[in-house]
Amino acid sequence: MAAYGYLLAGLVMGLFALVASSSLVVAGLCALVGVVAGYAMLPVIALDFANLPMLAFAGAMLGLAAARAGHQRRTPRATMGSALAVALALGWLIVLPMATSTPMLHAGAYRALIGPVDTLRNAPDLAPVDPAHVRMVDGRLAERLAERVLGERGALGSQVTVGTMDLQVVRGEWWWVAPLNHAGFFRWLENRAGTPGYVMVSATDSRDVRLVTTLDGAPLALRHNAGAWLGDVPARHLYANGYATRGLIDFSFEIDDDGRPFLVATEIEHRVGFSGATPVGAVILDVQTGAHTRCAIADCPAWVDLIQPTELVTARINDWGEYVHGWFNPSKKNQLAATAGTARILDRAGHQFHYTGIRSASADRGTTGYMLVDTRTGAATYYLQAGATEEA
């Protein structure tokens, strides 16, 4: 049942509206609004994600407003129903998340999200970066180079745009790779088959820029891309095909070693009430055919580079450093924090890591070391080596 997520969103909104208004007509109208909202919002059908309680609260408030606007005299039972619907919605939306997720009560759980952190001092592998894979091209330069090569194709530049440049390893080399996205609704409508390929920019050689439009002699057609509409939107396509109960974030564009294009979405679970998002696997979407595969972290194909999103990694590092002595630590004793910005590096064994400096919470320009977090597994290692922050 492809549309069950939308229907459940409508059911939640309609049910709370019914209790608040005691009117089947109001409940039915709110249920329809909920279905439309579900189509637009793609709410995760799980109790610990915020979208469903938001719809419940909206249904309760709309039902209450409709009841108050009615001219008939309300019974005490109907009035109690309105109060109950609003109270339950508020409890689900605000009270329950605060009780189960606030760092004041769950500082230890937040600090543990990063998992075991190995701390190394003067270790032999203190500088594991492979000098043969030092990146010379950053994301902004890669985007400009990609737009330039697209502009050289004349009319194609008016049909598509260059999507987000995603860093990845292809056949042992660093590349920035971006899909060609539809340039707007009418461009999508005119070319429902998909856009004609993707752009690759070498991260180590700015002269190596490729516009890839064929694969094994056949033309590429990227149907599911960020410029698509309605059911072709990647997140909506997955939502309607069995993933409405899964928290999917951070859709990154990756190609396998044969050049076949995919979108890789990180699947998360909440480990601290409504918060503490933790990657548990990935969903791989073939952007041409719409075929999809769900895999646990250990079972994802070797060409999948990024399962641990940068934002989540930074948040976990900061929680680990901030709650070293619990939530109440006004003197910031032993507190650590990540420096601004992260980088992706490749070690001599071919493993990828998020790199960020680590500083004392009370120091702005000096670091106590740096941390490497595996981009697939999330395993973290803290290297003790004093230095300066990127800004300094």
Image (cartoon, rainbow, N blue to C red):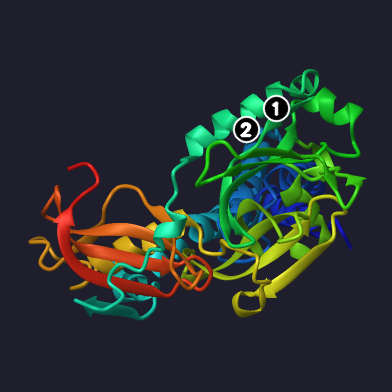
> Toward which corner of the image does residue 246 lie, by quadrant?
bottom right
Which residue type does callout 2 highlight?
Ala
Q: Residue at x 32, y 57 (%)?
A: 356
Q: Residue 192: x and y, percent? A: 90, 36
- Where does the image place residue 58, in percent across and percent down from the top left? 62, 45
Nearer-the-camera pick, 250 or 384: 384
Task: Where is residue 120? Give x, y as percent.
Answer: 24, 78
Residue located beneath label 1 in the image: 150
Name the kind of residue labelled 1 in the image.
Answer: Leu
Tell me, for residue 146, which label it has, or none: 2
Residue 188 in view (yes/no): yes
Where does residue 190 sit, x and y in percent of width and height?
90, 27
Q: Label 2 to label 1, Cα distance in Å? A: 6 Å
Residue neighbourhood size for the residue with mark 2, other residues' Cα within 10 Å, grouped as few (<14), some (14–19), many (≥20): many
Residue at far left of view: 331
Left or right of 336? Residue 34 is right
Do the residues under discs 2 and 1 have CB atoms within 8 angstroms? yes
Closest to the observer: 82 or 272?
272
Q: Is 59 positioned to the left or the right of 156 in the image? A: left
Q: Secondary structure at mark 2?
A: helix
- What residue lies at 26% left-to-right and 52% top-to-bottom? 339
Image quarter where the N terminus lies is bottom right
Q: Please, what secondary structure does the residue beneath circle 1 have?
A: helix
Q: Residue at x 79, y 24 (%)?
A: 156
